[in-house]
Image (cartoon, grey):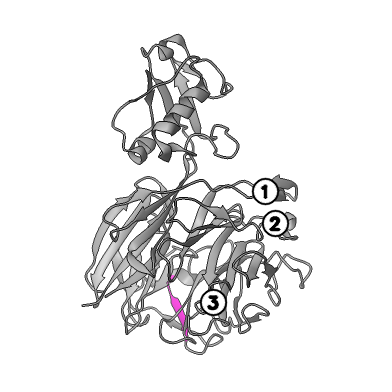
Amino acid sequence: MIRVLLPQQLRRLAGITGEVDVEVAAPVTLAAVWDALEAAYPVLGGTFRDRASGKRRAFVRFYACETDLSHEPPETLLPAAVAQGAEPLLVVGAMAGG
Amino acid sequence: MAGVRVLVGTAKGAFVLEADGTRRDWTVTGPLFGGWEIYHVTGSPADPDRLWASQTSGWFGQQVQRSDDGGRSWKPVGNDFRYAGSTGTHQWYDGTPRPWSFTRVWHLEPSATDPDTLLAGAEDAALFRSVDGGGTWEELGGLRTHRSGPAWQPGAGGLCVHTVLVDPTDPDRLHVAISAAGVFRSADGGVSWEPANRGLFQPGIPDEDAEVGACVHRIARHPSRPDTLFMQKHWDVMRSDDAGGSWHEVSGDLPSDFGFPIAVHAHEPETVYVVPITSDAEHYPPEGRLRVYRSRSGGNEWEPLTRGLPQSDCYVNVLRDAMAVDGLDPCGLYLGTTGGQVYASADGGDSWAAAVRDLPRVLSVEVQTLP
């Protein structure tokens, strides 16, 4: 089970309190977690990656185990601690604006 | 007793204002969708309990929210706004080609007769339609793929379809306005489109007869006269009496003919309202006095309406979708400001009072007249 912590705006949109757990079969990649999130919560479609291009939205960041994964390709394997459920994948709204 | 429900979209959420027919005492509900930009909230003419909201975010993209109970509860519906076919390019600010890319929905236009059908005007400029209550969206691609499309350039706010008018006598006759491509009209339900910008002179465009490029800010019409259109443009208030075939200026004696919104009285087709601001650089009222101007002659002769509006030190703006009229008699007017006030008039604009103050920047105001 993969633990994911979404930003407040997306938790509220999806009706989620706290972390969310999604089932992801190995290999546990960024894209696999994205797919699982959108399957479990269809309302999240288009919120962290563009529906048409599949690319990460510019102001959404992904962190895990104190590492910024935002610029890694979608097929990037997540750290073992995330794949094992010991650490969450953090989805973060980038600091932007004044 | 009849009442009104005012639907307010702001930069940080939506608000619902309700009052009885006197329109004096208001209850305020909100913020709904707090923290998100709500470009537009509107109701279905066919079912007053069916409401729609365009919820958008630079971070998290576009959502469309629907209420089936007059705004007490909401649920997100479809948000897959995908351009039909190959996307091609439009012009970017610097004149270079830029691929079309969906950003947000500026305006929702529900069907007058079917609660499940509505149009959505989008940025980058495109028109979408849903016929299943917002579950799925289909682009009416003939607009974006018009032969002039590669020459369209965005206005300062983006390349957006911000105005969508459906002819009340023939739902296949559509008008849209695009910043900064101008007006387009369709006679076949949005399959094919033609520019409708003749007579719109735009400072900065050397060709006075340019087919596209006018920076149209808003169009309005009275339902009893579908061929008469009023326009607030980036400079100039304009009028057409042939459904956009040609336009002529009716700015007349306005203190400034720059502004964003324009509205038509519910019961008087020749009574028109605008909110002049100083200039394209100074988006606030002349002399710091917020004045709605009313013409009872279809333009040219305008009178300031000031009672109850701030007449000193007022430097707010009223955005293009932030003025609305109700269907009561006397006709009510509503406007929302970039300073977060929503002003209401229950007497056709003669006097005003704040229905609510200190909201976030108001992006849109619509009103439903309830039985």
Relative to B244, does residue B360 appear above or below in the rendering?
Answer: above
Subunit under mark 3: B
Relative to A80, does residue B17 appear above or below in the rendering?
Answer: below
Residue B42, x across and y down, in percent: 40, 63
Tags 1 and 2 both on a single chain: yes
Residue B85 - label: 1
Secondary structure of the residue carrying tag 2 is loop
- Of the numbered discs 3 and 2, the one sitting upstream in the chain is 2
Three-letter amino acid code of the residue under disc 2: Thr
Which residue bears the numbered disc 2? B145
Subunit under mark 1: B
Distance in Å between CA atoms under marks 3 and 2: 24 Å
| Magenta highlight range | B289-295
* Quadrant of the image occupied by residue B338: bottom left
Three-letter amino acid code of the residue under disc 3: Asp
User: Within 10 Å of the Cα at label 1, are there few (<14), some (14-19), or many (20+) other Cα atoms?
Assistant: few
Residue B217, x across and y down, in percent: 57, 66
Distance in Å between CA atoms under marks 1 and 3: 28 Å
Three-letter amino acid code of the residue under disc 1: Gly
- Of the numbered discs 1 and 2, the one sitting upstream in the chain is 1
Q: Using the rendered image of the protein, determine whether residue B200 is visible from the camera's viewpoint.
A: yes
Q: Quadrant of the N terminus of chain A?
A: top left
Secondary structure of the residue carrying tag 3 is loop
Tell me if label 3 and label 2 are in contact, CB under 8 Å.
Answer: no
Residue B170 - label: 3
Subunit under mark 2: B
